[in-house]
Image (cartoon, coloured by chain):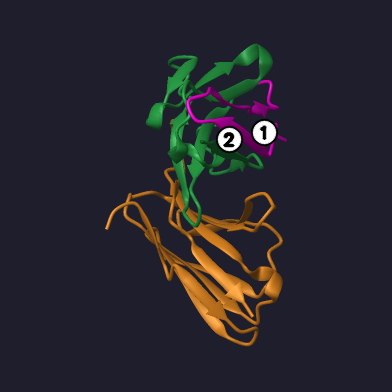
Chain colours: A orange, B green
Amino acid sequence: ETGVTQTPRHLVMGMTNKKSLKCEQHLGHNAMYWYKQSAKKPLELMFVYSLEERVENNSVPSRFSPECPNSSHLFLHLHTLQPEDSALYLCASSQVGVGNNEQFFGPGTRLTVL
Amino acid sequence: AQSVTQLGSHVSVSEGALVLLRCNYSSSVPPYLFWYVQYPNQGLQLLLKYTSAATLVKGINGFEAEFKKSETSFHLTKPSAHMSDAAEYFCAVKETSGTYKYIFGTGTRLKVLA
Protein backbone atom coordinates (compact mmCIF):
# COMPACT_ATOMS: atom_id res chain seq x y z
CA GLU A 1 0.00 0.00 0.00
CA THR A 2 1.15 3.49 -0.74
CA GLY A 3 0.02 6.98 0.22
CA VAL A 4 -3.02 7.32 2.44
CA THR A 5 -5.61 4.56 2.61
CA GLN A 6 -9.09 4.69 4.12
CA THR A 7 -11.53 1.94 4.98
CA PRO A 8 -14.32 1.38 4.41
CA ARG A 9 -14.91 3.33 1.21
CA HIS A 10 -18.66 3.32 1.74
CA LEU A 11 -20.65 3.00 4.94
CA VAL A 12 -24.37 3.03 5.59
CA MET A 13 -25.45 3.14 9.20
CA GLY A 14 -28.51 3.74 11.30
CA MET A 15 -28.66 6.47 13.89
CA THR A 16 -28.19 3.99 16.75
CA ASN A 17 -25.21 2.15 15.28
CA LYS A 18 -21.59 2.41 16.32
CA LYS A 19 -18.96 2.23 13.60
CA SER A 20 -15.38 3.31 13.01
CA LEU A 21 -13.54 4.79 10.08
CA LYS A 22 -9.91 3.85 9.63
CA CYS A 23 -7.09 5.77 8.01
CA GLU A 24 -3.51 4.64 7.48
CA GLN A 25 -0.66 6.64 6.02
CA HIS A 26 2.41 4.98 4.54
CA LEU A 27 4.42 8.19 4.08
CA GLY A 28 6.19 8.56 7.42
CA HIS A 29 4.37 11.79 8.16
CA ASN A 30 3.96 13.25 11.64
CA ALA A 31 0.52 14.85 11.34
CA MET A 32 -2.87 13.39 10.46
CA TYR A 33 -6.22 15.06 9.82
CA TRP A 34 -9.94 14.33 9.55
CA TYR A 35 -12.05 16.50 7.25
CA LYS A 36 -15.78 16.44 6.55
CA GLN A 37 -16.94 17.28 3.03
CA SER A 38 -20.66 17.87 2.59
CA ALA A 39 -22.42 18.79 -0.62
CA LYS A 40 -22.35 22.53 -1.34
CA LYS A 41 -20.33 23.30 1.80
CA PRO A 42 -16.64 24.10 2.26
CA LEU A 43 -14.21 21.47 3.40
CA GLU A 44 -14.48 21.31 7.20
CA LEU A 45 -11.45 20.49 9.32
CA MET A 46 -12.57 18.28 12.20
CA PHE A 47 -9.48 17.06 14.01
CA VAL A 48 -5.70 17.30 13.74
CA TYR A 49 -3.14 15.08 15.38
CA SER A 50 0.47 16.19 15.38
CA LEU A 51 3.03 13.78 16.80
CA GLU A 52 0.08 11.72 18.08
CA GLU A 53 -1.26 14.60 20.17
CA ARG A 54 -4.62 16.10 19.29
CA VAL A 55 -3.86 19.72 18.47
CA GLU A 56 -7.14 20.80 16.97
CA ASN A 57 -10.77 19.96 17.58
CA ASN A 58 -13.07 22.31 15.71
CA SER A 59 -16.19 22.17 17.86
CA VAL A 60 -17.06 18.77 16.54
CA PRO A 61 -20.02 17.05 18.27
CA SER A 62 -19.06 14.39 20.78
CA ARG A 63 -20.74 11.71 18.66
CA PHE A 64 -17.48 11.85 16.66
CA SER A 65 -14.50 10.53 18.61
CA PRO A 66 -11.01 10.44 17.07
CA GLU A 67 -8.21 8.13 18.04
CA CYS A 68 -4.57 8.19 16.97
CA PRO A 69 -2.77 5.15 18.42
CA ASN A 70 0.44 5.85 16.50
CA SER A 71 1.75 8.17 13.82
CA SER A 72 0.54 5.93 10.99
CA HIS A 73 -3.03 5.24 12.05
CA LEU A 74 -6.04 7.42 12.67
CA PHE A 75 -9.56 6.36 13.55
CA LEU A 76 -12.87 8.16 13.71
CA HIS A 77 -15.35 6.42 16.00
CA LEU A 78 -18.98 7.17 15.24
CA HIS A 79 -22.02 6.69 17.47
CA THR A 80 -25.61 7.89 17.47
CA LEU A 81 -25.10 9.93 14.33
CA GLN A 82 -27.67 12.18 12.70
CA PRO A 83 -28.74 12.22 9.04
CA GLU A 84 -26.93 15.56 8.58
CA ASP A 85 -23.68 13.74 9.34
CA SER A 86 -23.93 12.04 5.96
CA ALA A 87 -20.90 13.23 4.00
CA LEU A 88 -17.55 12.25 2.54
CA TYR A 89 -14.99 11.91 5.32
CA LEU A 90 -11.45 12.54 4.21
CA CYS A 91 -8.28 11.65 6.00
CA ALA A 92 -5.03 13.43 5.21
CA SER A 93 -1.45 13.45 6.41
CA SER A 94 1.46 15.85 6.18
CA GLN A 95 4.97 16.35 7.45
CA VAL A 96 5.03 19.31 9.80
CA GLY A 97 8.40 21.00 9.84
CA VAL A 98 10.66 23.05 7.64
CA GLY A 99 9.57 23.48 4.08
CA ASN A 100 6.51 23.72 1.94
CA ASN A 101 4.95 20.38 2.65
CA GLU A 102 1.61 19.55 1.16
CA GLN A 103 -1.13 17.36 2.56
CA PHE A 104 -1.75 13.95 1.10
CA PHE A 105 -5.36 12.80 1.07
CA GLY A 106 -6.98 9.41 1.20
CA PRO A 107 -9.85 8.48 -1.13
CA GLY A 108 -12.44 9.14 1.55
CA THR A 109 -15.27 7.22 3.18
CA ARG A 110 -18.75 8.01 1.88
CA LEU A 111 -20.99 7.86 4.94
CA THR A 112 -24.76 7.67 4.76
CA VAL A 113 -26.76 7.91 7.97
CA LEU A 114 -30.32 6.65 7.71
CA ALA B 1 -6.40 35.24 10.02
CA GLN B 2 -5.41 33.88 6.68
CA SER B 3 -8.21 33.31 4.17
CA VAL B 4 -8.53 32.05 0.62
CA THR B 5 -11.06 33.22 -1.94
CA GLN B 6 -11.90 31.31 -5.09
CA LEU B 7 -13.99 33.40 -7.44
CA GLY B 8 -16.62 31.39 -9.26
CA SER B 9 -17.99 28.22 -7.73
CA HIS B 10 -18.70 26.90 -11.22
CA VAL B 11 -16.72 27.49 -14.42
CA SER B 12 -17.60 26.10 -17.85
CA VAL B 13 -15.22 26.02 -20.79
CA SER B 14 -15.30 24.39 -24.19
CA GLU B 15 -12.92 21.55 -24.93
CA GLY B 16 -9.69 23.05 -26.23
CA ALA B 17 -10.31 26.44 -24.63
CA LEU B 18 -8.22 28.15 -21.97
CA VAL B 19 -8.94 27.22 -18.37
CA LEU B 20 -8.57 29.98 -15.77
CA LEU B 21 -9.47 29.33 -12.13
CA ARG B 22 -8.95 32.19 -9.72
CA CYS B 23 -7.48 32.15 -6.23
CA ASN B 24 -6.68 35.08 -3.96
CA TYR B 25 -5.19 34.92 -0.48
CA SER B 26 -5.38 37.47 2.28
CA SER B 27 -1.98 37.52 3.95
CA SER B 28 0.49 40.36 3.47
CA VAL B 29 3.27 37.83 3.87
CA PRO B 30 3.31 35.35 0.99
CA PRO B 31 2.16 32.01 2.37
CA TYR B 32 2.72 28.56 1.01
CA LEU B 33 0.21 27.97 -1.79
CA PHE B 34 -1.28 24.85 -3.30
CA TRP B 35 -3.81 23.73 -5.90
CA TYR B 36 -5.62 20.42 -5.52
CA VAL B 37 -8.02 18.58 -7.83
CA GLN B 38 -10.83 16.29 -6.71
CA TYR B 39 -12.64 13.86 -8.98
CA PRO B 40 -16.07 12.54 -7.93
CA ASN B 41 -16.00 10.40 -4.79
CA GLN B 42 -12.24 10.64 -4.49
CA GLY B 43 -9.80 12.45 -2.25
CA LEU B 44 -7.91 15.59 -3.13
CA GLN B 45 -4.82 15.23 -5.31
CA LEU B 46 -2.05 17.81 -5.44
CA LEU B 47 -1.77 19.58 -8.80
CA LEU B 48 1.03 21.95 -7.93
CA LYS B 49 2.55 24.05 -5.15
CA TYR B 50 4.35 27.36 -4.90
CA THR B 51 7.87 26.94 -3.60
CA SER B 52 9.21 30.53 -3.98
CA ALA B 53 11.85 29.27 -6.43
CA ALA B 54 9.81 30.60 -9.35
CA THR B 55 6.64 32.62 -9.71
CA LEU B 56 5.35 30.39 -12.51
CA VAL B 57 4.75 26.90 -11.21
CA LYS B 58 4.12 23.92 -13.47
CA GLY B 59 2.05 21.02 -12.25
CA ILE B 60 0.61 17.79 -13.44
CA ASN B 61 -1.80 17.33 -16.35
CA GLY B 62 -0.60 20.49 -18.11
CA PHE B 63 -1.73 22.90 -15.39
CA GLU B 64 0.30 25.83 -14.18
CA ALA B 65 -0.16 28.68 -11.74
CA GLU B 66 1.42 32.08 -11.43
CA PHE B 67 2.18 33.67 -8.07
CA LYS B 68 1.60 37.43 -8.13
CA LYS B 69 2.52 39.05 -4.85
CA SER B 70 1.20 42.49 -5.84
CA GLU B 71 -2.23 41.00 -6.53
CA THR B 72 -2.10 38.37 -3.73
CA SER B 73 -3.16 35.86 -6.34
CA PHE B 74 -2.28 32.35 -7.43
CA HIS B 75 -4.53 31.65 -10.41
CA LEU B 76 -4.55 28.24 -12.08
CA THR B 77 -4.43 27.95 -15.86
CA LYS B 78 -4.30 25.36 -18.60
CA PRO B 79 -3.95 26.39 -22.24
CA SER B 80 -6.31 23.78 -23.65
CA ALA B 81 -9.07 22.07 -21.68
CA HIS B 82 -9.67 18.36 -22.01
CA MET B 83 -12.83 16.49 -21.08
CA SER B 84 -10.87 14.67 -18.37
CA ASP B 85 -10.20 18.01 -16.62
CA ALA B 86 -13.81 18.14 -15.42
CA ALA B 87 -13.48 18.04 -11.62
CA GLU B 88 -13.48 20.28 -8.57
CA TYR B 89 -10.42 22.40 -7.90
CA PHE B 90 -9.32 23.72 -4.52
CA CYS B 91 -6.81 26.40 -3.69
CA ALA B 92 -5.14 26.13 -0.28
CA VAL B 93 -2.65 28.11 1.78
CA LYS B 94 -0.38 27.39 4.72
CA GLU B 95 0.94 30.31 6.68
CA THR B 96 4.37 29.12 7.69
CA SER B 97 6.55 26.09 7.35
CA GLY B 98 6.14 24.95 10.94
CA THR B 99 2.38 24.90 11.12
CA TYR B 100 0.05 22.00 10.59
CA LYS B 101 -2.87 24.15 9.50
CA TYR B 102 -4.01 24.45 5.88
CA ILE B 103 -6.79 26.83 4.81
CA PHE B 104 -8.86 25.73 1.82
CA GLY B 105 -10.96 27.75 -0.56
CA THR B 106 -14.55 26.77 -1.23
CA GLY B 107 -13.67 25.10 -4.50
CA THR B 108 -14.46 25.67 -8.18
CA ARG B 109 -16.24 23.02 -10.18
CA LEU B 110 -14.94 22.93 -13.74
CA LYS B 111 -17.21 21.70 -16.50
CA VAL B 112 -15.77 20.99 -19.94
CA LEU B 113 -18.18 21.19 -22.86
CA ALA B 114 -17.72 19.08 -25.95
Name the residue furthest left: A1
Q: Which residue appears at 59% of the width and 73% of the height?
A: A112
Please give the residue where the numbered disc 2 appears in the rendered image: B91
Residue A114, percent from left and from top? 64, 80
In this rendering, is residue B3 above or below A6?
above
Which range is magenta? Answer: B1-30
Instruction: Determine whether the residue tagged by mark 2 lies in a helix, strand or loop.
Output: strand
Q: In the image, what residue occupies the spot 63% across and 21% down?
A: B73
Q: Amino acid at mark 2?
A: Cys
Q: Chain of mark 2?
A: B
Circle 2 Cα neighbour tier, 10 Å, few/some/many (<14 / 14–19 / ≥20): many
Report x, y in % for residue B9.
68, 39
Query: Which residue is rendered at x = 39% and y = 31% of the image?
Result: B61
* Circles 2 and 1: CB atoms closer than 8 Å: yes
A111 in magenta? no
Q: Chain of mark 1?
A: B
Q: Would you place residue B69 above or below residue A43 in this image?
A: above
The numbered dot on residue B6 is 1
* Mark 1 residue element: loop
Q: Which mark is residue A70?
A: none
Taken as a whole, is the magenta stretch helix, strand or loop? loop
Q: Give x and y (percent) for residue A3.
A: 34, 51
- Vertical placement of residue A56 versus A97, above or below: below
Residue A51 falls in image quadrant: bottom left
Q: Nearer the viewer, residue B84 or A19?
A: B84
Give neighbour class at mark 1: few <14, some 14-19, many 20+ (Cα, 10 Å): many
| Residue B48 in the image, given as x and y percentages of width and height | 45, 30
Position of the N terminus of chain B, as image quadrant, is top right
The quarter holding residue B95 reads top right
Q: Residue at x 63, y 34 (%)?
A: B11
